[in-house]
Each structure stands twice: as structure tokens, then as C-alpha cells.
Amino acid sequence: MPSFDTVCEADLVEVKNAVDNAAKEIATRFDFKGTSASIEFKDKEITLIGDADFQLDQIDEILRNKLAKRHVDVRFLDKGTVQKIGGDKVKQVVKVRNGIEAEAAKKIQRLVKDSKIKVQASIQGDAIRVNGTKRDDLQAVMALIRKDVPELPLSFNNFRD
């Protein structure tokens, strides 16, 4: 029986490379000389540190450019709030999404069931498996999910025939 998995997984190696490239650019840029501007990646979290909110915005823009060059969708980033740390420094934690949250998974499952396409969708951990009898039905479901769930950077893998 043909099936595929719908997942939301960032390529963490590419994310780490993009963060490293952004850190190199921050270290060499003239407008960041003598400031506490920095960026680091640890445990699926990117920490931005700067002297002011404006500087955090600049670091975020550099990071987004580096991610785009490495073909990593910026919708994987989930920005946290700006926090004040000692002195005049501020930091922001940006989480890298990995897996589909339960609420979004239920929404996708309901979308597939309401479409009246002869397939079954089941939530399996942080992925959604879609089974059907025809390959064309599965491809129609892929198109439906891409069209109706634009806020998540979903990908489809493990396609079995």
C-alpha cells in the first residue's frame, strides 16, 4: 500500500554552517567592532547577543541571509522575546523547529480527512503518515497540504509504492 510521511525537519548541519558563517561575518564587520555582538548555536537553539535591539535585528538579518544561501527555510526559526542581560546587553533565543506540534498535526489530519480523498492520515510521533491505494491520491494530498498549510516548512519523505 503506497504511503508517505509528512515531516517538519530542518537540516541541522546546514543551520550550524549558516550560524558559523554569520559569526565570521559579525567578527569581521566594521559596524560590530568593539561591541558584544555574537551568535551561537547549541541544542537546536540559536542565541543572538548584542548591545541593543537594533543590533539584534542586524544579526538576525545576517543569519537569515546565510540560511537562505544554504537553502534552509527561514520558517524553521521561532523567535523568542528579547531579554536584557547584565549591563546594556540584550539577547534573543531563536529556536529551530523540529517536528510537527500536536495542534498542527491535528489540523493537517483533519484537512486530509475533510478532503474526501480516499487516503488515511495518522499521527506518528512528530510526523504524519498518509496511506492510500493510489499514487495519484497521495500526490493530490501532497499538493493539498502544500497549498493549505503555508505557515509550516513541511517536507514529504519515505514515499513507498
Image (cartoon, rainbow, N blue to C red):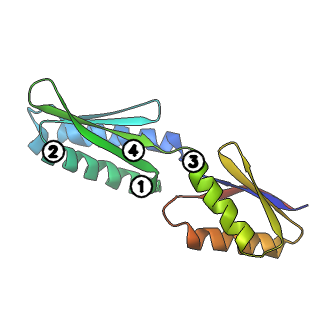
Q: Quadrant of the C terminus?
A: bottom right
State whether residue 119 is above or below residue 28: below
Mark 4–mark 2 Cα distance, whole angstroms, equals: 21 Å
Counting residues from the start of the chain, the first of labels 4 and 3 encountered is 4
Residue 85 percent across, percent down from the top left: 18, 27
Counting residues from the start of the chain, the first of labels 4 and 2 encountered is 4
Counting residues from the start of the chain, the first of labels 2 and 3 encountered is 2
Counting residues from the start of the chain, the first of labels 3 and 1 encountered is 1
Which residue is at the front of the view, 46 or 112? 112
Counting residues from the start of the chain, the first of labels 4 and 1 encountered is 4
SS for callout 1: helix
Instruction: Give the quadrant of residue 117.
Output: bottom right
Q: Which residue is mark 2?
A: 53
Q: What's under tag 4, amino acid-wise?
A: Ala
Residue 115 percent across, percent down from the top left: 72, 75
Q: What's under tag 2, amino acid-wise?
A: Asp
SS for callout 4: helix
Q: Which residue is mark 3?
A: 101
Do the residues bearing badges 3 and 1 touch, measured as CB atoms within 8 Å?
no
Mark 4 crowdedness (10 Å alpha carbons): few <14, some 14-19, many ≥20? many
Q: Which callout, 3 or 1, points to the residue nearer the camera?
A: 3
Counting residues from the start of the chain, the first of labels 1 and 2 encountered is 2
Q: What's under tag 3, amino acid-wise?
A: Glu
State whether residue 80 is above or below residue 114: above
Q: Which residue is mark 4?
A: 18
User: Which circle marks residue 140 in the picture?
Assistant: none
Q: Residue at x 35, y 51 (%)?
A: 66
SS for callout 3: loop
Do the residues bearing badges 2 and 3 touch, measured as CB atoms within 8 Å?
no
User: Which circle marks residue 74 in the picture?
Assistant: 1
